[in-house]
Image (cartoon, helix red, strand yellow):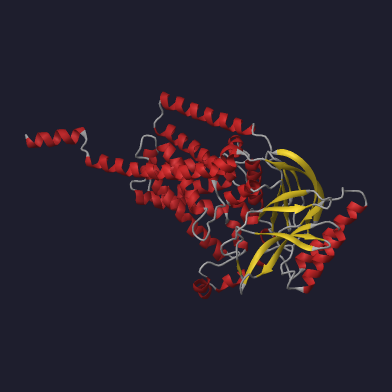
Amino acid sequence: MIDRLAGMPGALRTAIALVCGALAALGFQPHGWWPLTPLGVAGLTLVVLAARRVAGAIGLGYAWGVGFLLLGVGWMQVIFVQAMVGLVMVEAVFYGVLGGLLKVAFRLPWWPLLAAGCWVAVEFTFARFPFTGFGWMRLGYAMVDSPLAGVLPLIGVTGLSFLTALVAQGAVWLLEAWTRRRGLVAIAGLAAAALLSAAGGLVPAGAQVGTANVGWVQGGAPGGGVYGLGEPRTITRNHAAEAGRLRDKVDAGELPAPDFVVFPENTTDMDPYRDAQTGTLIRSTAARLGVPILFGAILDGPGPDERQTASLWWDPEQGELARYVKRGIVPFGEFVPYRSLLLPLVPELAYVGAQSVPGLVPGALPVTLPDGRGTTLGIMVCYDLVYDDFAYDTVRYGGQLILVQSSNAMYQGTGQIEQQFAITRARAMELRREVLVVTTSGVSGLINADGSVAFTGPEHVGASGVVTLPERTGLTPATWLAPALELAIVVLSLLGLGLALAWGRMGRSAPSPGEENGRLGSVA
């Protein structure tokens, strides 16, 4: 098959790479056809190995990345089409580099292992660089419903990405040159992966130390691109109104009384301390509910033309008692890198507004419930989800109730919302904790500790309820092993690539037996 691909015109190989990238993206939500992801990954390897030179492999990798990202993150066009195109063109560079690395890795006999490591190394890089990274389309996020997903509490998203890539490379390895020995090795590898996944399924949920009745409020938002939250204070009024309906259902005995109520990110679009109307709405909402609330607020500062996205623990009588400031902020969504340089060149970036400043403290917030019990809230706000350490810190620092607050109003009607929910499911499986998701306009819901979905609320409209959440303690192996595993894979992959380069040079410098005989004959 590789020889056949090598004989094709370059334009046709490029088209195949684009199609394979799109196939891999179909494994992600909202499509969720996860078998297509390893198939698309295998397709990239095939076209890259058929390239004559590393430069050609880089071009094919870039084409694969364009196909992958156009379908995978095309939802960003609801903000600005230019922003979406720019993101795709920049992020596809990483897959271009990956194409070159796969071509180099092929020089070694054990190249499938090295190729899978290269996938992890590239994901490691684009999750951090540039501008804090864009770790959205990692292979592991597409595989939460696959048989391999059982490994998540053991080796995390990193490990699941590695195994997904390894399965794809193994398939190409068999196609490249089928032998009985290779078949037996492949069967043994699949059996080992199945055993590891089964072992992950045996990791229990954290030890339960209590329960809490947690209310949730999704106020609903107008939706639709940059101005998805509507006119100023609209989103806060919507949530205040839905909170009133929740209180009415509790008073009528339809729902149990909550210990506290969670609202989403961007419950306020203005600083409740600076805007009198917003502050009044928050105070009246807390008073109406009669219990503490955790709500997402936009706060001015700490410096001029700066802001922070925070989760405030607000007591109906004492006001704010604790806060968590969002750590994972979105480049070109919440802040503009090199702002003074880029704003004159791209005036549309002004819509971002004041520069967001990330928090520095893990999302583990100790609070006291109305009955005097203490608990710790493990909080992730929207983009926090894509950073492994931010997710793991919620339980490393004692989080007992895991909460995700998000504002997806801008992306209503797009695949972004389902993709984020799938990432949240992966986090629930890694942490082995129930996760309550509360958003402005959907998808809100409860994810069980095994990643299954207990319920989801309606989209685009107001909704509310009360759920009983177990308070849990303890860590899964993934929370301490996955970061070390990721670093080890990256380092070993770099060493392996160095060996492959040296191997390639030795292969070019050493004459073949035929060449050696020819040279001896000419001397003679």
User: Residue 28: x, y in percent?
Assistant: 59, 46
Q: Is residue 29 visible?
A: no
Percent x, y of residue 520:
11, 34
In the drawing, does residue 475 fall left or right of residue 113?
Answer: right
Q: Residue at x 61, y 30 (%)?
A: 198
**Height in image: 276 above or below 17?**
below
Q: At 37% across and 50% down in the image, what residue appears?
A: 56
Q: Nearer the viewer, residue 104 or 159?
A: 159
Q: Whole-percent x and y of residue 449?
A: 69, 40
Image quadrant assignment for residue 312: bottom right
In the figure, is residue 354 to the left or right of 338? right
Q: Residue at x 42, y 27 (%)?
A: 182
Residue at 52% of width from left, 51% of height from top? 68
Residue at the left extreme? Answer: 524
Out of 322 and 24, give the one closest to the viewer.
322
> For residue 153, what is the image quadrant?
top right
> Can I make out residue 207 in this image?
yes
Q: Is 102 drawn above or below residue 248 in the view shown?
A: above
In the shown orientation, is residue 515 left or right of residue 437? left
**Direction right: furthest residue:** 252
How many numbered marks have been drawn onto this rendered protein structure?
0
Residue 9 appears at what percent x and percent y?
Answer: 37, 48
Report the quarter where the N terminus lies. Answer: top left
Image quadrant for the C terminus?
top left
